[in-house]
Image (tube, rainbow, N blue to C red):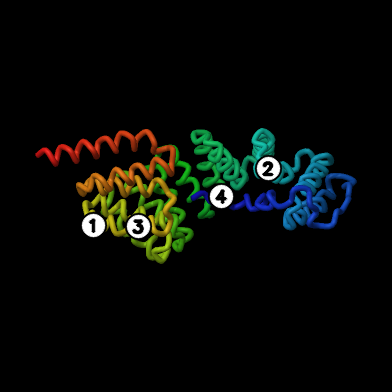
Amino acid sequence: MIKRLIASIVVFVSLVQGVNAFPTLVLDAPDKNFTQINHTIALAFVAHGNIYSAAKEFYTILRYNPEDVYANYYLAIIYEGLGNKRLAERFYKKAIAMSPDDGKIYYSYAVFLLNQKRLKQAAPLAIQATKLSPFEYDIFYDTGVILVENDRLEEALPYFKKSLKFNPEFSSAYNNYCFSLATLGQYEEALPYCEKAVVMDKEENAQSLDSLAFVYAGLKQYEKAKDYYEKAVFIDPNIGEIYFHYAQTLQAMGKYDEAAAHFKKAGQLDKNFKADTRKLIKECRRLKNKNAAG
């Protein structure tokens, strides 16, 4: 789960649609020394969901001070929320060029690129953000997530660990650290982290339950894995990855019909699994017929 520190600025976009939720204030700053007033007005508009008026204020700031970093930065976030990728990227790049030592700008730009599936470009920006903001647990966590998305699991581990150092109550970091270890085949080392995440989530988070089940399956404790997969799909029956993992465990247990059904469900819920699940369903049928013949 990617967490944004800054993106809450645009959560009201769907609500505004031209509605002024804050009294319209018109103020042209006489010079760049007074643009802080416009910043205050712009952020007031943001707080009340009036994104378009906020953008107007930020443009007023840039008219008098084109080098204002945060006017560029907030416009990038606003345009990202409005779905204008081209302008969002333009303003992110401007903000970074003006303030190359501000970690949160690198971070927000990295998450923007991640959301565009531009994974390779996102990773170095996220890593740079951790160097510039070395005490922000969210930034370390999300950098770990970005590295996982780039299939750089071993590199992701220290970022999850650092996130836990700064926030030892962060269940998502325990979960992601565990699952990364398990994916690398380090099941014994992963187990206590998954157990910690499940306890912290009070067994109410399907993803942490899935990770713990995945670890038990890796340890060949299939009945335990099955129990936790059942809990996970009960809590959230719409995550294809959980059905896929569950199907793998059922296949290992020799429950080929159930495994095929779960592979099918995984492919229906998540198109990323479609190609694999077709092959695996055929494999389940082949193994069932082989066992029946033998």
Q: Are marks 3 and 1 in contact (CB under 8 Å)?
A: no
Residue 3 in view, yes or no: yes
Q: Amino acid at mark 1?
A: Glu
> From mark 2 to mark 1, how far is it between C-alphas?
47 Å
Tag 2's secondary structure? Answer: helix
Q: Are marks 3 and 4 in contact (CB under 8 Å)?
A: no
> From mark 1 to mark 4, how far is it between C-alphas?
44 Å
> From mark 3 to mark 1, how far is it between C-alphas?
17 Å
Tag 4's secondary structure? Answer: loop
Q: Earlier in the sequence, mark 3 or mark 2?
A: 2
Choose mark 3 or mark 4, whichever is in front: 3
Q: Earlier in the sequence, mark 3 or mark 1?
A: 3
Residue 97 in view, yes or no: no
Choose mark 2 or mark 4, whichever is in front: 2
- Percent of width and height locating residue 181: 33, 48
Location of mark 4 (residue): 133
Location of mark 2 (residue): 82
Location of mark 3 (residue): 194
Q: Amino acid at mark 3?
A: Cys
Q: Amino acid at mark 2?
A: Leu
Rendered residue at 50%/48% (across/down) = 142
> From mark 3 to mark 4, how far is it between C-alphas?
27 Å
Location of mark 1 (residue): 223
